[in-house]
Amino acid sequence: MTRTLSELPADLAGKRALVRVDYNVPLDAGRVADATRIEASLPTLRWLLRRGARPVLLSHLGRPGGRPDPALSLSPVAPALAGLLGTEVLFSAPCDGEDALRASRELKTGQVLLVENTRFLPGETANDEALAGRLARLGDFFVNDAFGTLHRAHASTTGVPAVLSPSAAGLLVERELEALSALERPRRPFVVAFGGAKIGDKIELLRRFLERADLILVGGAMANTFLRAQGFETGASLVEEAALDLARSILSAGEDRIRLPTDVMVLDRAGGEGERAGKVEGVENVDSVPADAIGPGMAALDIGPASRARYADALRGCAAFFWNGPMGLFEDPRFAPGTFAIAQAAAEATAAGAFTVIGGGDSAAAVRRAGLSDRVSHVCTGGGAALEYLSTGRLPGLDALTKRIAQTGPGG
Ligand code: ADP
Ligand code: MG
């Protein structure tokens, strides 16, 4: 079991709480464009502030590649957090320097300190021990509430709790794990939907779901990859070539439980054979075609109307539902109906008593855009972490916390 906040020592007053949060937020012209992840961190921060602890926050933002990149500075998050939390939020850069250490020591009760993007330093993703040690100096105890990065063994996620004790999971992590654990022995029928574009990362996980799910609905570019694996023409569609063999073996193992779209919405670019989306000049036609009739110049960008209805039907009567990856390029309204139909069906299944979980950054954004976030059981803040936990039951970031407990004995 992972230690939770309630299992930390009772007297936290004046102690510096080093908190790993997930403030990997979208920025637009130097401002936070979507504060969902900041809002998700508030319960833990309020919990700590109420007890007089002084929060020092660590996060990454984007993929700066171990070098400072002003466009990926966390500084715009400080005012956004201050507004939401109603407290003063100080900012310090870099995250591992003497200035940050001094700021953490001088932090007053009621104030919060946010330090600069941990991925500005190469040691973060390399899980460098020396960096973890420098970060650990910023706190008297450690809380990991960055659910979205629990599947990564980085200095700020697994390195710090290896040297800073006690450590615990935050309230967001606790809530996420509760929802996902309910899918470990799901009520049946258990329906899963997989889509999106990160096929290389996800197809192995889809394979593992074969054992647990009664039905797997496939959409998005994931579906294109399966269609191609079956020998269909996929034209200019996004397909993960490297995953074709695995897709074929999944299909032969789970034929009875896997549903592929029977029709797709295509972008048919007259004279645009093989060209990539966005670069095409001339006429663009959007059409629904049977899945076995995708022409060479066509890109399949959503599931078609018949598949939409069939997938929505499959959701009716499910007892549990997990969904990762949009059914299409939903950012373009022409290719959003497939994704929105699944979101709507998930909301209806929830109303009928099913336990429904949406995982994945883009999937969550799609459900939000459909206005249905409050009508499903749970929307995960981290897709990769959710998938890893669901398929293996473990997360490196959690193991790091658990290990500390093992070393210090039960409850201590
Ligand atoms: P999540 O963030 O929910 O885990 P992914 O990151 O794997 O999902 O995929 C999301 C992206 O997949 C979205 O930007 C969406 O536009 C894209 N996508 C979905 N279907 C297709 C498709 N058929 N072709 C190209 N891109 C697609
Ligand atoms: Mg994504």
Image (cartoon, helix red, strand yellow):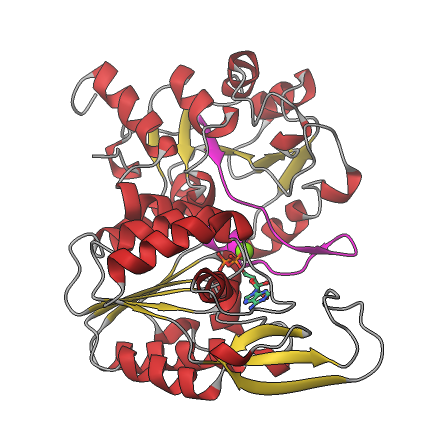
132 left or right, relative to 5: right
Image quadrant in which the C terminus is located:
top left
Which residue is pictured at 20% across the width and 80% down the height? 317
In magenta, the rendered stretch is: 16-41
- Establish if 6 lies above or below 391: above
Image quadrant in which the N terminus is located:
top left
**Quarter of the image where ligand 2 sits:** bottom right
Residue lying at the far right in this picture: please name it.
Answer: 281
Q: Is residue 36 rendered magenta in the image?
A: yes
Which residue is pictured at 20% across the width and 77% down the height? 353
Q: Is residue 59 visible?
A: yes
Q: Position of residue 199 (x, y in %)?
A: 49, 53
For residue 253, what is the image quadrant?
bottom left
Q: Position of residue 241 (x, y in %)?
A: 54, 52
Residue lying at the far top in this picture: please name it.
Answer: 130
Q: Position of residue 54 (x, y in %)?
A: 49, 32
Q: Is residue 174 visible?
A: no
Query: How many discs appear?
Result: 0
Q: Is residue 55 rendered magenta in the image?
A: no
266 left or right, relative to 223: right
For residue 186, what is the image quadrant?
bottom left
- Establish if 81 lies above or below 100: below
Which residue is pictured at 45% across the width and 22% down the height? 160
Q: Position of residue 409 (x, y in %)?
A: 18, 17
